[in-house]
Image (cartoon, rainbow, N blue to C red):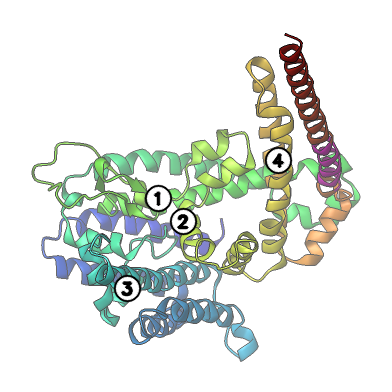
Amino acid sequence: MNVDDIIYVICLLACIGAGNYVRKIPDKSQKKYISTALGILMVFIVSGWNSFHCFVSALLGAAAVIYVHPSKCHLAAFTVMFGYLAFFRLASKFGLPDPPGHINMIQMVMTLKIAGIGFEKTASWKKLKEREKNEDVEISEYDTAVQSVDIIEIIHYSFNYIGILTGPYYRYRTYRDYFETSYSDYAPTIKTTLERLKYAGLYCSLYLLGNYIWPLEYALTDEFYNERSYFYRLMYVWPTFIIFRMRIYTGLTLSECVCTMAGFGAYPVEADVANGAGPRKPYKHLTPETYKGEYTFTAIVNTNVKDVEKCPTFRETMKHWNICVQYWLAVNVYKLFPSKKYRTVVTLLVSAYWHGFRPGHYFCLMGAPFYVHNEDMWDKLIRKNATGTKRKILDALFWFFKFFCGSYLGTAFLLVTFEKIWRFYSSVYHTCYVAWIVFLVVGTVWTKRNKAEEKRRKRLEEKKEEVEGTKAEEDKKSQ
């Protein structure tokens, strides 16, 4: 780990430790201001004077949410925040110093938060307008409250120390609930945090060990390309991707611990909580003083690690990876984009743009749909109806290819530049891309043959029924 990574981890651990103190502050207003002050301190420690980017973008985004009409403020906030994200990443082009790497994550999360308030405000405004025409339309107290959100409240939400460094993304409603309800006083915060810290320690240990044995830097050396075999180079994507996952798991798990120690995102199980979205059923009647059921922190869980590692298909894996961000993209981009034909492509482009402008992000994120299309096709051809031992074998094969694909694309994400990516892919003769094309051609031919066979079978059945019907009519006439 480099010095920046060590500082980052120390800041995350400090935020976890602060949670036990913040959670016990009785005065809600004082609690909010202390949480914001801690967040600003963390941003400054990690970013130094580059933290001005966060303040400028937050003020601009807040102005868009507040001063643009509610029917359009979501578009204004989206444009401002994603536009500033481009300016932030191209700072050197404008004579400004390049921001340190870790502030990039802070700016990314802040972009989703402030743009997200705009989308929430517009959605609530539309519900209120519908209610004026139809009294059967259900609205909540939150739908009215979000219409009057002010700049101070948006700054509090944006710079709250909980999630400021690595996320997870959470809605403004979840943030508001934290200061207006007392669930955090009764949820098993310490127990949940300690349990997750054990896993964070495991992921970090595996990351350090793997990075020591198979450093990514080795894949950039002439020795790697001149003295190592084709098979060695191709298989090197496996440990590289494992190391990458362990690094991500460590950061995400620690960021979840920041939430759980503070009791942030704690809701009764009966609230039917979804990742990122928060409660989907009424919950305000479940008062903490009388509620005897269990609590859940699902709202702030960003990745289900066990499911990511165990499930056999890439499509299924995506449902468990970066869930809170996927929720934001699904609700605010995919569902709202007017063209159904292009909404998937646009959502992926927004995701790639949000991650960064480097070629590796686009090689990785835009390559995934190509593999998923192949996977879906072959799932229907050979796996969907398989049972018993055959199903287990196919599950294992799909799991292997899923991680092979993820490792191959993930390596591009890590190598970043087009030159490095192309050098590596050329050294392994673009094996995965060639294999995907072969599987696509074979699978397409096989699928068309099956469809033709199915049509032929249906025609024969229809003809048989027609012959039998004619014969039955002739038998009636003869009688």
In the rendered image, which quarter contains the C terminus?
top right
Q: Residues within 10 Å of mark 2 (few under 14, many from 20)?
A: many
Which residue: 47% across, 47% down? 303
Residue at mark 3 to residue at mark 1: CA–CA distance: 24 Å
Quick check: marks 4 and 3 in contact, CB under 8 Å?
no
Mark 2, residue position:
327
Q: Residues within 10 Å of mark 3 (few under 14, many from 20)?
A: some
Which residue: 53% across, 46% down? 319
Which residue: 48% across, 39% down? 202
Mark 4, residue position:
375
* Residue 211 x %, y %: 63, 47
Q: Earlier in the sequence, mark 3 or mark 1?
A: 3
Q: Residues within 10 Å of mark 4 (few under 14, many from 20)?
A: many
Magenta stretch in the rendered image = 434-448
Amino acid carrying label 1: it is: Asn
Q: Secondary structure at mark 4?
A: helix
